[in-house]
C-alpha cells in the first residue's frame, strides 16, 4: 500500500493577512458605546485595559485615583478602623468624577473608565459593620444620585491567587498589607454582584484563562466582541473563559475561539 503524502501547511497569502488586519483596525466599539467601563477587583488589570482602549481609540479616561485617598493605606494596614473613612472618600471622589460625564456624553466624546459607582456597596458590605453600613447607606441616599450609567461594562474576573500574585508583582507599598483572605472575599463579592448586574450590557472576561491586558490577540478579540454586541438590555452577557454560577452553550456566529461562550441563564 502506498503511504499517504505528508500533509503540508497551506501557504497564507499576504493579501489575506493584510485584509484581516485592516478589518481589525477598522473596528471601533466607541461608535456604538460612548461610555465604556472596565471593572474588577484590585490587581486584575482594569486600569491597564481601560488605558489601552483609550489609547487605541482616542477616548478620554475616567480613572480611579486611589493614591488620593488618605485613608486607603491605613485601611490596608489596620483594617476596620479606617473602613468607613476610606469608603466615604471613594464615594465622594467618584461622584465628583462622574458628574461631568453627562456633558461630555452629549458632545459625543468617547469615555472609558475603570470604576462603576454601583459597585461601591460591594465594598461597604464587605468592610463596614452594621452601624457603619447603616450610616453609609443614609449618606448615599441623601446624595440623590442621578449619575449616568455606562453604555457597556467589561468585568475582569480572576481567582484570589491570581489577584494576590499580580498585587505582589506590581509592588505598590500601601498594598503590602492586603491578605489572601481579603482578596478571596472581595473576588466572591464581585462574582455575586455581576451575577445580578443588569444596569448595562455586560462582557465578562476570566483573566485566569484569557488575558486582553497582556496578550494582543486576546485584546483584538475582545474588541471584536465589543463591536459585535447587539442590543442594550436584551443582550445576554458574553463570557470569556469560566464563570462560576452560570450555565453556558457554545457561541455561534463569527466566534472563532473555544474560550468564548454565551450565557444563556443563571444557575440556581
Image: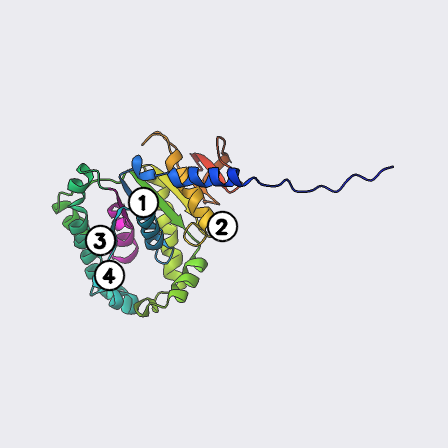
Of callouts 1 and 2, the N-terminal one: 1
Left or right: 206 as drawn, with respect to 5: left
Q: Which residue in the structure is indicated by mark 1?
A: 57
Q: Position of residue 195 (x, y in %)?
A: 37, 41
Question: Magenta part of the protein: which range?
Answer: 110-131
Task: Report the Cα–Cα distance between label 3 and label 4.
Answer: 10 Å
- In the displayed structure, would residue 22 be above or below residue 190? above
Q: Position of residue 241 (x, y in %)?
A: 48, 45
Mark 4 or 2: in front is 2
Mark 1 or 3: in front is 1
Q: Are marks 2 and 3 in contact (CB under 8 Å)?
A: no
Image quadrant containing the N terminus: top right
Q: Which residue in the structure is indicated by mark 4?
A: 83
The label shown at residue 209 is 2
Q: Does residue 146 show up?
A: no
Mark 2 or 3: in front is 2
Q: Position of residue 86 (x, y in %)?
A: 22, 60
Mark 3 or 4: in front is 4
Amino acid at each position: 500500500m502506498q503511504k499517504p503524502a505528508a500533509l503540508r501547511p497551506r501557504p497564507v497569502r499576504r493579501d489575506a493577512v493584510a485584509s484581516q488586519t485592516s478589518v481589525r483596525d477598522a473596528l471601533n466599539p466607541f461608535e456604538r458605546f460612548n461610555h465604556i467601563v472596565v471593572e474588577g477587583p484590585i490587581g486584575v488589570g482594569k486600569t491597564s485595559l481601560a488605558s489601552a482602549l483609550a489609547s487605541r481609540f482616542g477616548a478620554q479616561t475616567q480613572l480611579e485615583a486611589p493614591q488620593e485617598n488618605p485613608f486607603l493605606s491605613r485601611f490596608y494596614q489596620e483594617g476596620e478602623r479606617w473602613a468607613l473613612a476610606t469608603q466615604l472618600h471613594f464615594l465622594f471622589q467618584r461622584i465628583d468624577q462622574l458628574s461631568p460625564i453627562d456633558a461630555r456624553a452629549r458632545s459625543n466624546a468617547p469615555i472609558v473608565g475603570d470604576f462603576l459607582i454601583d459597585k461601591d456597596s460591594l465594598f461597604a458590605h464587605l468592610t463596614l459593620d452594621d452601624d457603619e453600613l447603616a450610616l453609609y447607606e443614609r449618606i448615599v441616599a441623601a446624595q440623590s444620585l442621578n449619575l449616568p450609567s455606562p453604555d457597556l461594562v467589561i468585568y475582569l474576573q480572576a481567582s484570589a491567587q491570581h489577584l494576590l500574585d499580580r498585587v505582589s508583582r506590581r509592588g505598590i507599598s500601601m498594598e503590602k498589607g492586603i491578605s489572601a483572605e481579603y482578596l478571596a472575599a472581595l473576588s466572591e463579592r464581585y462574582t455575586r454582584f455581576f451575577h445580578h448586574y443588569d444596569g448595562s450590557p455586560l462582557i465578562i472576561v476570566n483573566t485566569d484563562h484569557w488575558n486582553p491586558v497582556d496578550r494582543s490577540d486576546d485584546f483584538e478579540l475582545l474588541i471584536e466582541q465589543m463591536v459585535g454586541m447587539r442590543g442594550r438590555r436584551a443582550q445576554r452577557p458574553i463570557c470569556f473563559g469560566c464563570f462560576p454560577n452560570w450555565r453556558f452553550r457554545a457561541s455561534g456566529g463569527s466566534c472563532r475561539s473555544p474560550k468564548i461562550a454565551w450565557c444563556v441563564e443563571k444557575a440556581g
